[in-house]
């Protein structure tokens, strides 16, 4: 049931793969876009899409969707799912998620939070950036690894659980007949 539901959503909102393959701005990719794993829902392609998309979501640069698409092409993951997952970090969720990543980086670097009571100024902000970037990037990397691993193994577990449930239902039907 979940696969059919997800398949309907993808077919409704994602353009036909053939349209994308023949698009004039994507012709430089050649036959790479013809890989069926990029478009079909399989345990491997969906779990890899979660890994790629969730990792790319934690990369604090613009154009995360492009990074996710390149990762999906490289790892032969489901392209639409990988691109959509990047939007977990959108303009509304970015501040709390990236602040959390900064705090994780501070914790891993065993640093305490700077407390500056002097108020806001451009000079204090620029000098503060030199103290913030290392724990922020480390936290983003750590959160990217954790989320992509959790997404990959979570989808594989959920998928296997669904398959086992369907097999049990089939077995129960056979024993009833």
Image (cartoon, rainbow, N blue to C red):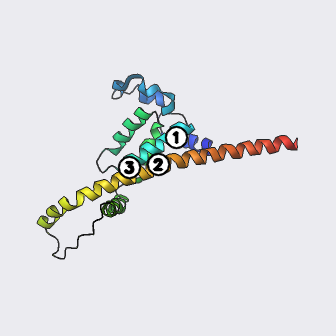
Where does the image place residue 31, in percent across and percent down from the top left?
Answer: 42, 22
Q: Residue furthest top?
A: 31
Label 3, residues with CA under 10 Å away: few <14, some 14-19, many ≥20: many
Against 75, is 161 above or below?
Answer: below
**Of callouts 2 and 3, the N-terminal one:** 3
Say which element carries label 1.
helix
**Cα separation between marks 1 and 3:** 16 Å
Query: Would you say the residues marked 2 and 3 are in contact, meaning their CB atoms lie under 8 Å apart?
Result: no
**Cα separation between marks 2 and 3:** 13 Å
Where does the image place residue 95, in percent across and percent down from the top left?
Answer: 33, 61
Q: What quarter of the picture does the C terminus occupy?
A: top right
Q: Residue furthest front?
A: 110
Q: Residue furthest left?
A: 123
| Nearer the camera: disc 2 or disc 1 | 2
At x 62%, y 41%, the residue is 4
Label ID, residue 92:
none
Q: Is residue 13 visible?
A: no
Against 17, is 92 above or below?
Answer: below
Which residue is tagged 2? Answer: 149
Where does the image place residue 49, in percent across and percent down from the top left?
Answer: 47, 41
Which residue is tagged 3? Answer: 57
**Of callouts 1 and 3, the N-terminal one:** 1
| Nearer the camera: disc 2 or disc 3 | 2
Which residue is tagged 1? Answer: 46
Q: Quadrant of residue 108?
A: bottom left
At x 34%, y 40%, the residue is 67
Residue 157 versus residue 112: which sits nearer the camera? 112
Label 2, residues with CA under 10 Å away: few <14, some 14-19, many ≥20: some
Residue 22 versus residue 168: which sits nearer the camera? 168
**Of callouts 2 and 1, the N-terminal one:** 1
């Amino acid at each position: 049931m979940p696969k059919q539901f997800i398949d309907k959503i993808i077919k409704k909102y994602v353009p036909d793969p053939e349209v994308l393959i023949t698009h004039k701005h994507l012709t430089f990719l050649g036959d790479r876009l013809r890989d069926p794993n990029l478009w079909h829902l399989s345990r491997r392609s969906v779990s890899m899409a979660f890994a790629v998309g969730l990792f790319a979501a934690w990369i604090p640069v613009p154009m995360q969707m492009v990074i996710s698409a390149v990762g999906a092409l490289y790892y032969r993951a489901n392209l639409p799912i990988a691109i959509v997952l990047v939007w977990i970090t959108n303009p509304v969720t970015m501040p709390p998620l990236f602040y959390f990543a900064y705090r994780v980086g501070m914790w891993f670097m065993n640093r305490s939070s700077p407390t500056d009571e002097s108020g806001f100024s451009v000079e204090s902000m620029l000098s503060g950036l030199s103290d913030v970037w290392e724990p922020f990037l480390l936290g983003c990397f750590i959160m990217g690894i954790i989320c992509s691993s959790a997404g990959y193994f979570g989808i594989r577990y959920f998928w296997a659980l669904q398959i086992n449930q369907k097999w049990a239902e089939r077995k129960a039907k056979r024993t009833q007949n």
